[in-house]
Image: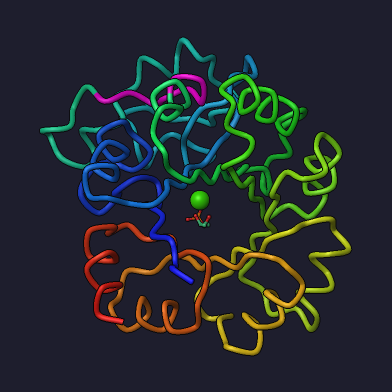
Amino acid sequence: MVTKVIAHRGASKYAPENTMSAFELAVEMGADGIETDVQLTKDHIPVLIHDENVKRTTNGTGLISQLTFKQVKQLDAGAWFHPSFSGATILSLDEFLQWFANKSLYLNIELKNNKIEYKNIEAIVYEMLGHHKLLNRSTISTFNPNSIKRMKSYRKNLEVAFLTSKRYRNLVQLTKELGGNALHIKYRLLNRPLVEHIHQENMAVRVYTINKTSRMLNCYQHECDGIFTDIPDKAKHVRKLV
Ligand code: G3P
Ligand code: CA
């Protein structure tokens, strides 16, 4: 099994996370897939941003949920990272998928709905992925257990991952009960018996966020299905060493 190298928020070590520059760089570096984060604006437009507040990654302040899409589009999402990226904007999910649809890459959309339970985010994202014909090569993931069942109700064979950093006693059973069919786990949870158990249940396991060589090697040797990394060029190089 070849572990997929999934660019975490794009090639986010080299370019501002979740911007077009970071995604384009991920493709140039030969990433096998892209991971991104979705939240909803005040007028219910899905946009790509990790934090609930725009403060860290733009020149603005306030919650995404309190800003209209028009207001969000006026923010600079690149200058905080480096002046050479100034002018970058927060992307709508639709803009991103239009660009992504003709790339033959794997996609992971993370619903950022564990702190704010955005109403209908599952339906909005599901419809948009369907519109761009991307349901067959995408995984929807979430830290919110309630969201998994809602997502699954739209399409039985959609891959929906439970995202977690917590040490549950029976994580695999819990994921099945929630209706999930993949696990996206923090590195500290990784061990060989867990990977084997997940695979025995025909589920995929992907690990975040893997930037150190030793951790990359460990994930590859454990035959994880994917790693989320900010440094896809390095992860591809290390993969050749296994
Ligand atoms: O999807 C894996 C990883 O992105 C989850 O954590 O905080 O980087 O979104 P975070
Ligand atoms: Ca994420």
Q: Main secondary structure of the magenta part?
A: loop
Q: Position of residue 176 (x, y in %)?
A: 83, 64
Asked which colour scheme the image uses, the reply is: rainbow
Which residue corresponds to the image point at 57% horizontal and 87% vertical from the top-left? 191
Q: Position of residue 16 (x, y in %)?
A: 27, 41
In the drawing, does residue 11 fall left or right of residue 36? left
Residue at the outermost left position? 84
Q: Position of residue 39 (x, y in %)?
A: 58, 33
Where residue 135 sits, quadrant-wise, is top right
Which quadrant is the C terminus positioned in? bottom left
Where residue 140 sits, quadrant-wise, is top right
Q: Position of residue 45 (x, y in %)?
A: 59, 19
In the drawing, does residue 187 fall left or right of residue 42? left
Magenta segment boundaries in residue numbering: 88-95
In the image, residue 52 above or below residue 146: above
In the image, residue 143 above or below residue 224: above
Whether the magenta-drawn stretch holds residue 14 is answered as: no
Which residue corresponds to the image point at 63% horizontal and 14% vertical from the top-left? 43
